[in-house]
Amino acid sequence: MTMRTILLTSLTAFAISITAASAQEVTLRAVTAFAEGTQFSKNFERFIEKVNADGKGIIKINYIGGPRAMPPFEVGNAVRTKVVDIANVPGAFYTNLMPEADAFKLMTKPMSEQRKNGSWELINQLHNQKLNSYYLARSFPNVPFHIYLNKKIDKLDFTGLKIRVTPVYRDIVQALGGTPITTPPGEVYTALERGVVDGYGWPITGIFDLGWEKVTKARMDPAFYSVEVNVLVNLDTWKSLNDAQRKVLTDAALWLEALDAENVAAIAAEREKQAKAGIATIDFGAAESKKFIDRANDVGWQAVIAKSPETGKKLRELAGN
Ligand code: 173
């Protein structure tokens, strides 16, 4: 062999190895149901950064963005139909496709426990069957919801009040006599500003990201339910990945779930920040608060079990509440 042939041969081999490596790197398209950079997108964005760092040459996530790219209530269906490969979205936004998703707010145990006690498996099966997706992660089980109000109430009664809801709060608002009005998060500010609603449901964290403190007078205590934001992967996409690619995603998913430890401090800080912003606390005392929480729990499970008796009961057993 001449020197020239050796050089050409090794160059060719080099070119082939580059092609093989890039053919193995897969790119997933991602969306989030919440505005980019806000509370319930932030950890997903950190997850994407981690996947892109750990998965170099193997797997990459192309972050398309939030509601500017896709209406929040369509994200579940977009994962189902593989319009996107991966999404950050609460089950509450796809109860039209999976009525059982209404139960996730009642599954309050840490994910480390839900992964051991069969909850993850059952919820993954539901996603496989009804959303053609893989249940990669769930965040925020230790963050509760509240009802925020712009009108005074002197007892636990929402009669005459219009409250902005998603499926998370619809049943409890109705049980207390209120009129639920469903909107995506992006319409809450204007609805409050124009007096279209007298209050809204939202987690304890995140209102400052959206500027809602400017149009919010009070937060009703107690806190109730449990925030659920899921990372879902289209099932065909998931099946097409190799072991190394799945491992990058799974490791990052467990890392994402571990970020929930940060929420304890974030909740305390947020309560303080709301008070400083002049948001009053409405509290009817321990006995009334307990009644409210019990009622919320009851109407929540009743709604799930009415729609899906068998699975609903299984989920309730696993939730243990
Ligand atoms: O209020 C909502 O839009 C909602 O249901 C929700 C769910 C999870 C996190 C934040 C908000």
Image (tube, rainbow, N blue to C red):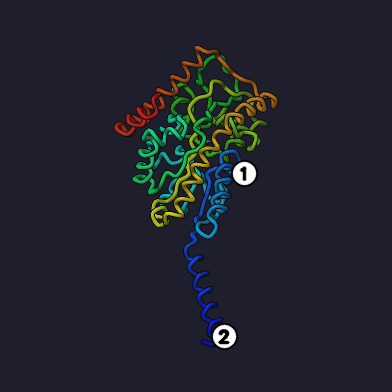
Q: Nearer the viewer, residue 144 or 302?
A: 144
Q: Nearer the viewer, residue 158 or 39?
A: 39
Q: Secondary structure at mark 2?
A: helix
Residue 239, compared with residue 93, is above or below; it is below
The location of residue 145, given as percent across then percent down, is: 53, 28
Query: Which circle's residue, 2 or 1, is located before the other in the chain?
Result: 2
Q: Amino acid at mark 1?
A: Gly
Q: CA distance from mark 2 to mark 1?
A: 56 Å
The location of residue 117, given as percent across then percent down, is: 38, 33
Q: Quadrant of the C terminus?
A: top left
Residue 306 visible, this orientation:
no
Q: Amino acid at mark 2?
A: Met
The location of residue 29, given as percent across then percent down, is: 51, 55
Q: Residue at x 39, y 25 (%)?
A: 320
Ligand 1 lies under 8 Å from the Cβ of mark 1: no
**Residue 3 marker:** 2
Residue that badge 1 annotates = 37
Where is residue 40, by image quadrant?
Answer: top right
Q: Is residue 4 left or right of residue 133?
A: right
Q: Is residue 128 left or right of residue 206?
A: left
